[in-house]
Image: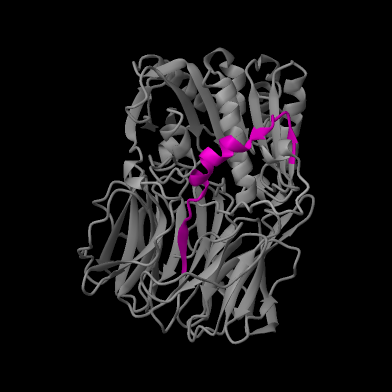
Amino acid sequence: MHKILFSLFAITICAASCLAQNIASASPRDTMTAKDAATVAPNENLIVEGVPAIPRALADTMNRYTEFRAASFSSWHPTKREMLIRTRFGNTTQVHKVSMPGGDRSQVTFFPDNVGGAIYQPTDGNYFVFSKDTGGNEFNQIYRWDWKNGNVTMLTDGKSRHGFGGWSDDGKQMVYGRLKTTATDVNSELHIVNPAQPESDRVLTTLAGGGWGSLVWSPDARTLLVLEGISANESYIHLIDVATGESKILTPKDIAKSSAEKVSYDGIAFAKDGKGFYTTTDRDSEYKRLAYFDLATMRPTFLTESIKWDVDDFELSDDGKMLAFVTNENGIGVLHVIETASGKERGLPKLPPGIVSGIEWHKNNRDLAFTFTSTRASSDIYSIDEVNNKLERWTASETGGLNTEALVEPSLIKWKSFDEREITGFLYRPPSKFTGKRPVVINIHGGPEGQARPGFLGRTNYFINELGVAYIYPNVRGSSGFGKTYLKLDNGLKREDTYKDIGALFDWIKTQPDLDASRVMVTGGSYGGHMTFAVATLYPERIACALPVVGMSNLVTFLKNTETYRRDLRRVEYGDERDPEMSAFLTRIAPMTNAARIAKPMFVVQGKNDPRVPASESAQMVETVRKGNVPVWYLVAKDEGHGFQKKANVDYQFYATAMFMQQYLLK
């Protein structure tokens, strides 16, 4: 299944997979003083305000928690049983080749910035294409990497924002998207190119808006299926003629039983005979079901009627005979394979509870690759030989020498909010060696359509294992994974209701005999950062401190200043700031408006190049809160965007976070 081309929903807050670098020993030529050697200096890309000097001794005790690595699947070779993966050996995540299960990870790309997706040319694999931005600005360019000589060729214009599409079956054409923006307009320009001949690049068509993606070729290469994303609850599928660029909508707005109902589609795959396609949709359902649509009639056949959970991902085998898909069951990813002809489910090796993603069939129609992570396992790559039901592990990521089997497993918790609605989350209690009431960190996910799931916590394990801090990851209203009604409960004028879910969580914490309601820190990234700002203004007496990361401090100024291509999508979620009534409401509830209520210390983290949440959102909040004589620490990375990704930056943020917690939460 091809992912959304210009993903406006994803949150890229760096976690366990941020990578390691060794600290070199001093040489006789070093000129640092004894005082300098006793502290950890921020690197040249970090702007640090208010953060005290970090003792080297503290960093040394934390360093093994910075050595977690992770690997994610990128692409199968079309003729060989080998793959491209993404992992980190140095400061950034790069493309590596793995030639067999458990084989060496051979690094292929070497760039100062993270490399995104990498996809083999689909017939002979003589080259692959990959994407990369600069400094986290998300204006990705697409490149070709040649195996013959290691040459790298840029295929795009070097300045616009681009996204991958799919390949034609003959491997001679690739479709991709380019965003064309002005101060007021956003358009998506679809291009077709033979990457082996960059001069062949041509514009297929221009589509209004910035949410176009999932560009999928028909088997005869005459048409493309394209997904138009309006919001998390609304999207449409179009069919485009490759020769003329003409487009027609396949899923009109009145296709649901109720014309007032918004319908969401996510991902598309043409059937092998080209007569229909597969997709996931919440049409006439609370959850996203896997469906087959006949192109002649556009009548759906639902393939997962018996499964009352969202289908998160799916992948059709090259011969069209097998469909692999992943269901999201209370945050746990469950892998399935069914036969397309009969709908019969095939037996698979049992996986431990965790998160399954990135599924892809090899062209041999038997090997299914996927990325797997769990509470006790960093992200790694596996495959299942569907013929003999054999599970194989391709990578074994390092864990800094820690015994991951000793890491704490989460408990599912539930509490009633202000309106008696049940809210859930995951609680990680520290080891039993810590006695007495434990301090608590509430970590709120981004999105806001994200979902807290029991994956690998990476560095956060230090705070749980070594400092005895309990962590709660709530799924407040508006989170995905709980049906489309729940997903819409925080939209527009309902925004304050999701803040109140955290207020109710404070009440729940107070009832727990092992949790200390007087020592609570709230944190989160992106929308979770906005929630952190909001909670700090609404419940200053309930928290000890707050740590917002790339958060919005005022949804009105955010909507005016976020990149143009994101505004319409975000307006559906937050409300249209151009409407006077909505603008007045959003201004009234804005953390910036209510910043005078903030009474507890705050640590604000921001990437300077963030295209989603502009750095001005953090800067204006820092300036305002400081006027109230509240302690504010401020950390900005000049070479990062929406959350820190480079290991050197993430490590410093990690050390500073420990200092902040020791000073304001643990005392």
557, 155: nearer the viewer: 155
- Judged left or right of residue 61, residue 416 is left
Q: Residue at x 52, y 47 (%)?
A: 66
Q: At which x and y percent is residue 436?
A: 37, 17
What residue sits 76% from the left and 40% below the top?
Answer: 33
Which residues lie in the magenta part? Answer: 47-74
Q: Is residue 435 above or below residue 457?
A: above
- Look at the picture and state if 246 lies above or below 463: below
Is 55 within the magenta? Answer: yes
Q: How many marks?
A: 0
- Residue 326: image location, x then y, percent: 34, 56
Residue 526 visible at all: no
Left or right side of 234 for 595: right
Give left or right: position of 592 versus 645: right
Identify the residue at image location x=62%, y=66%.
131
| Residue 605: % across, % down | 66, 37
To which quarter of the image does residue 291 belong?
bottom left
The magenta stretch spans residue 482: no
